[in-house]
Amino acid sequence: MTSEQEIFSLYDSYPDSLLDICMDYLVANLNTITTLDPTSRWRKLKDDITLPADLCEKFIQTYQKKNRVNDNIANLFRDPSRTRLNCVKLRNSRITDEGLRCFMVHRPYSVELVQCEYLSQASLDIINEYSDRLVSLKFGPLTYDLSQKAQEGHLSQKGHIIDAPNLRQLTIQCRRLPISPLLLVKPLKNLTHLDLSEFTSTVSTCALHELKNLRSLSLHNVLCSKEIIDWITTLQSLRHLDLSHSSEILGKYNSPNKVLSSIVTSLPHLQSLDISGTNLDGSEAASVHARCDIPGLVSRVNNPLEFLGLYETYNGACRRHDIPAKVVSF
């Protein structure tokens, strides 16, 4: 047996921690720390139980391994004086807006709501209500149209959809629903990481220009119009950019060499770039005498990217020799 195999074998046979064992037991035997209210039929913590943040978050993590979190479980965390949550991570849960409020009253730093299909548009209002400490937010795929929410008068009252003044990271999964840049106005000026993968860009990007501090931008499977490309070139702090596509139609740009060159020459701090599934790799040799087989990246010959994604590019750039990047995926 090799040393690597021995390590994996040792890891596989390593016993669960005492904390893991205890949490598995509590999840399987909820009556140990909870009671069922005979009137409301809601579960609640026993009167002598108080749980710190690390145990609350561990309980939710363990519960989700075998069950779907619902409002009954969310009700256990309704009282912030007896429970604490700094991070809320829910996936494929059955919570409604009422259950979400039980979690949000803790004013968490990080919130992830992935595939929580029973949440309505009102869930955004609940998040906003308790967002003063929120640094990271991830939610979706949405089952409703954000732009429709804007049209229904919400924006006319507040001027935005997401109000989290300290937000640094935002991921919205919409899967082909139209992007409304109005949700990204003044309250999100501190944003440094933005993921709008699979949005359909159908409206003006004027409000996106408020985002001056972006370091990471993911536009996977987003049809990037000239307006969006022009906006990207203004993001002087950008270090990580994902323009990859899984669709041959969406990944095709007019004047690809010019587009790529414009991006990389405008972003002096860019470290990683993913153009997989696009034609941005170019089909012609560089017109200048430089050791670079990707025309749009000539300016990075003496300052290579840390990472460059070239998986299934139109012109097979991964087979070329002189690529100005330290690590290339293909």
Image (tube, rainbow, N blue to C red):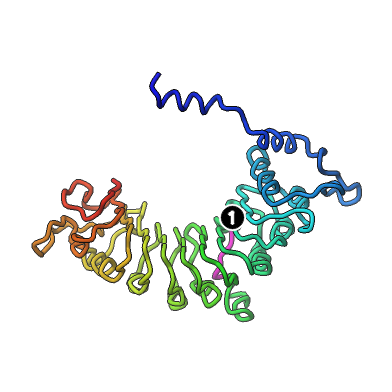
Please identify the quarter of the rendering in which residue 81 is found: bottom right
Q: Residue at x 58, y 52 (%)?
A: 114
- Magenta residues (range): 143-149
Q: Left of 32 or right of it: where is 38?
A: right
Q: Position of residue 90 (x, y in %)?
A: 62, 50
Q: Position of residue 225 (x, y in %)?
A: 35, 69
Q: Residue at x 25, y 59 (%)?
A: 280
The amino acid marked with disc number 1 is Glu
In magenta stretch: residue 132: no
Nearest the camera: 53 or 234?
53
User: Please, which residue is most extreme toward the right here?
Assistant: 39
Nearest the camera: 174 or 108?
108
User: Please, which residue is most extreme toward the bottom here?
Assistant: 156
Viewport quadrant of the N terminus: top left
Secondary structure type for disc 1: strand
Nearest the camera: 131 or 303?
303
Q: Which residue is mark 1?
A: 112
Q: Position of residue 120 (x, y in %)?
A: 66, 61
Quick check: can you spot residue 43? no
Q: Residue at x 36, y 51 (%)?
A: 246
